Image (spheres, helix red, strand yellow):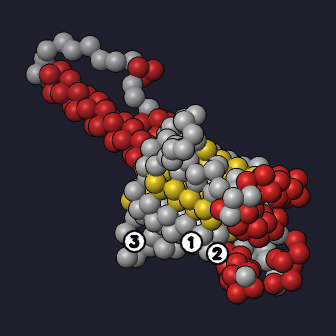
Amino acid sequence: MFSKLREDIHSIIERDPAARNGWEVLTCYPGLHAIVMHSWAHACWTAGFKWLGRFISYIARIITGIEIHPGATIGRRVFIDHGFGVVIGETAVVGDDCTIYQGVTLGGTTLVAGTKRHPTLERGVIVGAGAQVLGGFTVGEYAKVGSNAVVIKPVPAGATAVGNPAHILRKEDQSRSAHLFAAYGVTPNGDDPLSKALRGLIDHAARQDEQLERLCATIKAAGISCSTLSESDKLDQAQLNRLVE
């Protein structure tokens, strides 16, 4: 138990620059307290002492503001940062080295007891603040879920999911960068594919406008009358690109 506690403290210090030393983490980090108390509740739950497991998890929620069902499976070196408002359901599985920020829900979308209702987070997953991961699917190794995303389907390993409903921002090269820690699931220089598509359409429309202007100029030069658009009707490429940044 003490070796696991030392592991947890060391992993928190590695991932949180505000953590100054082990004593501060041990005494002042509710995420660590919730994990420790969950280990007691889970032991009672698996041993058949269901009420006692639920009661310990209830006390942990009062103390830490973090609710972890005693039936949930929590791996090693899991860091719940800040943690207030985190809810982890009964059949959820949180793998080793995962990071979960405040306001996250690992919830279920079915009322059928005895089924896998809650998500599985594989090793190294990061779930940003306020994200909702809902359903009995898997979020792959080292994937990232952006803050306030609503995830309702599986996320591939190494991918980043953002938005409501969530879509895949990009799938990273795991051999190069997928193992790098990204606070709150924010990937540096990540580019939203929807924004990229919109910018592509805007650029294409702007090129068409230029071609039409050249065509009209050529027709006029040939002495043929050709009406042109007023300035207010022309595409403002710069303004539209700013709107989708």
Residue at the image position 54 percent from the left and 44 percent from the top: 114
Amino acid marked by disc 1: Asp
Q: Is residue 152 left or right of residue 52?
A: left
Per the image, label 1 sits on a secondary structure element best described as loop
Amino acid under disc 3:
Gln
Tag 2, which secondary structure?
loop
What label sits on residue 96 in the rendered view?
Answer: 1
The label number, if any, that marks residue 77 in the structure image: 2
Between disc 3 and disc 2, the foreground one is: 2
Q: Is residue 40 above or below residue 154?
A: below
- Say if 68 sits above or below 214 in the image: below
Q: Which residue is mark 3?
A: 174
The CA distance from mark 3 to mark 2 is 20 Å
Find residue 177 and report its image quarter: bottom left
Going from the N terminus, do you reach mark 3 or mark 2 first? 2
| Image quadrant in which you'd find residue 15 | bottom right
